[in-house]
Every structure is written in C-alpha cells, then in structure tokens.
Amino acid sequence: MVTIKIKYIFTTLITLFVFNTSTQLAIASDAYVRTKYQEGQGILRKAGSSCFLYTPAHVITGAKAALVETRLRKRIRAELINTYPQDLAIAKLEDASACEESSWKGGGERVDAILDVVRAGRLNYKHKQGRIEIFDIEITDKALDATFDIKLKNNKEFRKGMSGSIVTVGDYPIGMLLSVEGDIGKVLRMDTMADLSKRVILRYVTDKEKIEMGEVSAINNTQQSNTQASSSVTAHEKPQTQTNLKPDKIESKGTLSEGDVQEVKILARGNTAYNIVSQPQQKNVKYKLYFFDDAGNELFSSNVEQSKRKLEWGVGVADAGEYTLRVVGVSGSGEYNLAIHTVATPEELLSPSNVIGTNDSISGGLSRGTYAEYKILAQGNTAYNIVAKPQQKNVKYKLFFIDDAGNELFSSNVEQSKRKLEWGIGVTEAGEYTLRVVGVSGSGEYNLAVNTVATPEELLSPSNVIGTNASISGGLSHGTYAEYKILAQGNTAYNIVAKPQQKNVKYKLTLLDDAGNELFSSNVEQSKRKLEWGVGVTKAGEYTLRIVGVSKSGMFNFKVETVATPEELISKSNIISLNDSISGGLSRGTYAEYKIIFKSNAAYKITAKPQRNNVTYRLELYDSIGKRILRSGTTQSKRKFQWDLDSAQQGEYVLRIVGVNGTGNYFFKLEG
C-alpha cells in the first residue's frame, strides 16, 4: 500500500471544450454570398491549396463574381468556375484560408444511410450581419436520387436569402437548400454535389486527396494537367492552416517530489475519449495518476509509475462536466511530462449521422469509459457479418447489439482492436437497432465492416419453395432464420444432405407442419460439416423447413432429396404373399404399408437383408379391422434381422414398416 503525504497542490484549469473545427462550424452555413442581383448561402470546400464555394446557381447567375463573407473573414471575392443544370454553381475564392471554416465532409458517402433512417435535422442560416439562426426541420420526401424535400418545424417559415443554407444531421452536412415552393424546401444532396463537381475538383486536389476520393487512377495524370491546375492558383492563395478550436494535446509538466500534487481540470461536454502519454524524463520520480469526476469519485487510477519510462493510458468520460487529472508524487524528486490527447468527441461517438448503410464500414477512436453508437435500419429478418480490421493503436472493447426497446440481442467478449475478428448477428423484425462499441481498457482506434449477409427477401421470400430433389443455399447469422416451403402430396420420405461450406455458421434445422407444430429438429450443427437427416410427413399439406442461425455468420447449402413418395409407400399394389420380397425407401416420420395374405394357419417369418443406406425402423402387424396385434423392437436396416410370426391365422393383414430415425432403404422377404 502506498502512503502519500500531501505537501502542496498546483492546479491548472484547462477548459477542454471537446469540439473540432468542423463540428462547431457545421451548426451554421459556411458563407453568406452576395452578388449585384441576389443573396444566399453556401458551403466551402478545400481542394489542394484552393478554396471553393458551392451555392445555388440562381444566387450567382448573371454575375461573373460574388462577394463572400465567413464568420472570420469579410468581403472575399469569388470567381464563378462552373454551373450545373441542378441549380448548382461552383466559385473559387481568392483567399484560400477561408476554407479553415469549411463544413464539407468527404463526398457525402453517408447521405444514403442517413436518409434511410433519420427523418429530422437542422437548417443552418447565416444572416447578413453574421448572426446564426438554426431551424429544426422534417425530411418529408427522399424519393428522388439528387434531391430531397424538407419542412420547417414549429410553424417557422422560409425566407428570402435562405437558398444555399446547409442541412445537417448532427454535425454531418447532408445537403444544401436550393429553392422553396410553399412550405416545402428542395435540398440538393451532398453526394450529388460531390459527383457533379468531381471533374473540376480533381484539377486542384493533391494526390492524397485523390486517394481519399477513390480516384487512384487520376494520380498518374500528365504533367500538362498538373501544370494547368497549378496555373489556376491565384497570387492570393496560400497553404491552408487549420484553425484548431479544440486543444488536441494538453501538456502538464514540471517538477514533482514525494507528497506533491499537480492537478489539471478538464471540462468535457459529454462522451469523450482521452489518451494520456507520459514522456520519458532524465530526472526520475515515482508517481501515480488519478482521474476524478466533479463529485470526487475516482474514475481511474494508475499503478505507481516512474517518469523515466514512456507510458500510455486510456481514460474517458460519458457525461458532461468538470473532471480532474491528479498527478501525485510518491517517491523521489524529478520531472514529469504528460500529454493529454482527445481521441474522440461526443459528436464523433454519438452523432445522429452515425448510421450504418448496406455493407458499410465504421471507424473511430475509443478509450476506457467511453462508447460509440451507430444506428442500423433493418427491413426485417436480416443477417449481418461484422468484421474487425486490425488497428495499430490498440484498445480493448466490447460490442453490443440492442433493439429499439433497449433489449440486448448480442454482446461480444472483451476484444482487442489489434486483432482481426468476426461476429455474426441478426434481427428478425423490422426496426431501428443500435450497434454499441464500448471501450474497456486503454485507448486506440477501431474499424468495423458491417456486411449484410442475407436480406428478408432472401431469407423469407415467397419464392423459397423446395421442389423434387432440389438444392437450397444462402447466408445466415446468429439471430436470423431462413424458411422454405415443401408441398407434400401425402406420406413422403425426405433425405436432407448438408454440403460443407467455407464460411461456417452454427445452425439448427426444424420441420414444421402448416399449424406450426414441430415435427423434427436437429442438434446445433456447423455448416462446415457434411451431415444428413431423414425427415418425413404422413399427410398432404404445406410444410416449412426452417434453418435457424445459432452462432456466427456464414453460408448454408442443403439438398432435399425425395426418398419415397405416397405412391411408393402406401400403394394399393403393395401386396405380398409367401416367398415375396419387398424393398423401398423410408425416413423418420414416414411409413410403408403392405397387404399380407396368409392362406393357411402356419408359422411365418420376415427376414431383413442388410442395406448400405441405413434407416432405423420397426415392424407392426395389423388385422383386417386395423387393430395392431404385433410390434417388433427398433432395429436398423444395415443389420440382418428376423421377425417370427408364430401360429399366424389364415386371413388378410397389413404389415407396416415405420421409420424411426434417419433415412435409408429396407429389404424384406416373407418366408414360411
């Protein structure tokens, strides 16, 4: 146990507002735009060393240039570069540093996924005087590929000069207001704006930005193209310097001796992940770190460490408030140097724009005590495969999958982000689900690919019907199921063969009648193994073969073979007499019947010839009025068997061969 004598305390107050440049500026349009004829709004986009303005074409039409005002800069001249039929114009600013206030994010890749799930957002309007006004909006129609419609909530009305205002969900821009008709505003999607302007932007971006845009082939452009792009840069442009509105790194350093305490106050706005790095010092001192909330509760404490060593810790907070990082000298006297990095902000971890689309990837930073959440909109019975890609910056984490009522449908073990891992999860009902990534220890990064393995249309399609000797295949995951219909004409025996699959999933098979009664269920099996089952039905009707995912995600492939039909099992021509032989196929749940005619009172025996295709069965003998008079024990068709019928009376009887388990063939001879 370490006893610490407190000599004196140094306290440093660091207001660590956890937002970054794009986050703050996303709450307002980037620019107010004014020409001789019109006024409006616009969004800024950096491309290489240039800065571009996107604004509705009608705002700038008729003028070769416009004046642009941002939050920090006034009267920047913008030269019109291009216009598009979708009422979009692009202008190039003389002062490229204006793009330090840009809200542009990627190429609008998340717009589709967001519009599938989210129906509310904000319209951000900048007044001529610079005042910001934010309007809550409802997304009313997203049917068109290039645009979507919005309405202002709370009885607010659109006004002149709003064209070009940015529409956001959380801190993510999804479109720009083009026009208004009545109380409906038409918004041009961000991904459409990016696609339309790609050819222009590619002339200015760096090779790194081309890679980020997915334009790898454009890197090998001719020197002439590069020269043309360079010649377009005006003398007013200069390399961009990002305005850092959140301290990405806070340092706490100085001398420390036994009993000394240094404190750093951190003001967090909510769910925030930090990474604390101790830089090695020549003058060594032993110390401990503590992390407290504003009520004095200890959220984290380190071991006794030495300042001569490089060390890292991941800490995080879930609630807004003031927190204290305390450095306590334990032994000796020396120097320490701590850097506190913000790994992830509330806007990154819990943004409404954290929506997972079809076959989408998610990534970010995480630390102990924080969590990230992503929404998934499922149309119904859907199977997913989640793949964790190995990361250099390792963090221990857990995954949770939660329905819209807060019920936990799945949770992983504690895993490490430096490892490649896979999970299969699924849902059976339509709705909004949450994938939660919870930091357990350390701080680092995660990258998860969420792939759709099977959709409701594939798993439960009305066309999922099994014909005679048909094969079925598909994807499956934990929590989902596939169903296939079988139309039986009556007493029918089936053999189901599972073909081994590379992508393994644990599953169970069940056979249900049309009233939902379970006629058969398998053990939990793996799709990487070859397996066989015998199943059968005795009555005509519609039956359901259900394949239920139990664990992981993968593929299945089954062949459903018809072993025996009603015509073969219970035909009127199934008649045997002395020294006749009978043979056929049989499975669990079915039976074959043969009429036996004993012409005299005598002793008879039925002998079984061993068969390769084994089925477990029993024999039963019925009199002419349907009363069972004899029953054999259960045996297997791969074995030699004899059933003695002592003192049989003359008359007509029915021999029934009942399938008990498996599927296979039988062969019998009636002897005297």
Image (cartoon, rainbow, N blue to C red):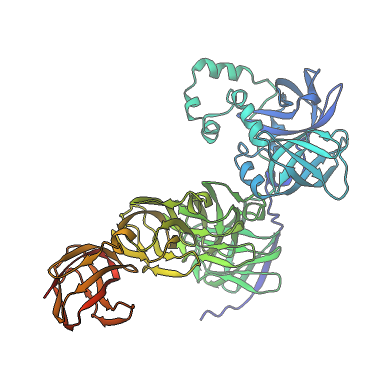
Q: Where is 29 relative to 429, above or below?
A: above
For the view shown, which residue lies furthest in the bottom direction? 647
Nearest to the observer: residue 18 or residue 261: 18
Left or right, 390 with respect to 37, comes to left
Nearest to the observer: residue 12 or residue 368: 368
Q: Say which quarter of the image contains residue 151.
A: top right
Instruction: Give coordinates of residue 237: x percent, y percent.
Output: 67, 25
Instruction: Give coordinates of residue 264: x percent, y percent.
Output: 66, 63
Q: Quadrant of the C terminus?
A: bottom left
**Residue 417 showing in the rendered view:** no
Q: Say which quarter of the image contains residue 143.
A: top right
Nearest to the observer: residue 573 or residue 79: 573
Q: Which residue appears at 65% of the width and 35% of the height?
A: 145
**Residue 328 showing in the rendered view:** yes
Instruction: Give coordinates of residue 231: x percent, y percent.
Output: 61, 17
Q: Where is 129 relative to 542, above or below?
A: above
Q: Which residue appears at 30% of the width and 62% of the height?
A: 571
Q: Where is 499 relative to 75, above or below?
A: below
Nearest to the observer: residue 27 or residue 667: 667
Q: Total marks drawn?
A: 0
Q: Say which quarter of the image contains residue 38.
A: top right
Instruction: Give coordinates of residue 77: x percent, y percent.
Output: 77, 24
Left or right, 70 with respect to 554, comes to right
Q: Which residue appears at 50% of the width and 17% of the height?
A: 223
Q: Where is 127 relative to 659, above or below?
A: above
